Image (cartoon, rainbow, N blue to C red):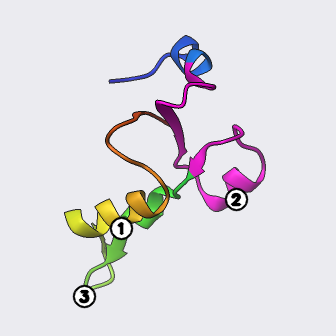
Amino acid sequence: LLSTRDEIIRDLDNEECMLLDSRSKREYSSGRIPGAVHIDWLENFSPDSSGSPIILAPAALQKLYVDQGVTLDKRLHAY
């Protein structure tokens, strides 16, 4: 599901919701929504033996997100 602008604004102070900023580190450092968790979208991948990017295994993805505080019990708005 896509979040609308109004839904995100409504949920900014809602403790049951969180924002996930998936932009690059450079983009994130140039400005962000306060309180957003940052996980660069490239962190979802690792190189295979030929150097081509492949998505991380489910357990590795889960660890990446849980380590940053992303949990399944909250509504997530990603951008």
Mark 2 / mark 3, whichever is N-terminal = 2
The residue most toward the right is 30
Q: Image check: 49 left or right of 11? A: left
Mark 2 / mark 1, whichever is N-terminal = 2
Residue 46 horizontal/vertical position (percent): 35, 75
- Is residue 9 among what the camera can see? yes
Q: Which amino acid does label 1 sit on?
A: Phe
At 63% from the left and 25% from the top, the residue drawn is 13
Residue 26 horizontal/vertical position (percent): 70, 59
Q: How crowded is mark 3: few (under 14 residues within 10 Å), some or many (20 or more)?
A: few
At 35% from the left and 67% from the top, the residue drawn is 45
Q: Give the range drawn in magenta.
A: 11-37
Which of the numbered marks, if any, corresponds to residue 26? 2
Residue 4 horizontal/vertical position (percent): 49, 16
Which of the numbered marks, if any, corresponds to residue 45? 1
Q: Does the magenta stretch include residue 58?
A: no
Which of the numbered marks, if any, corresponds to residue 60? none
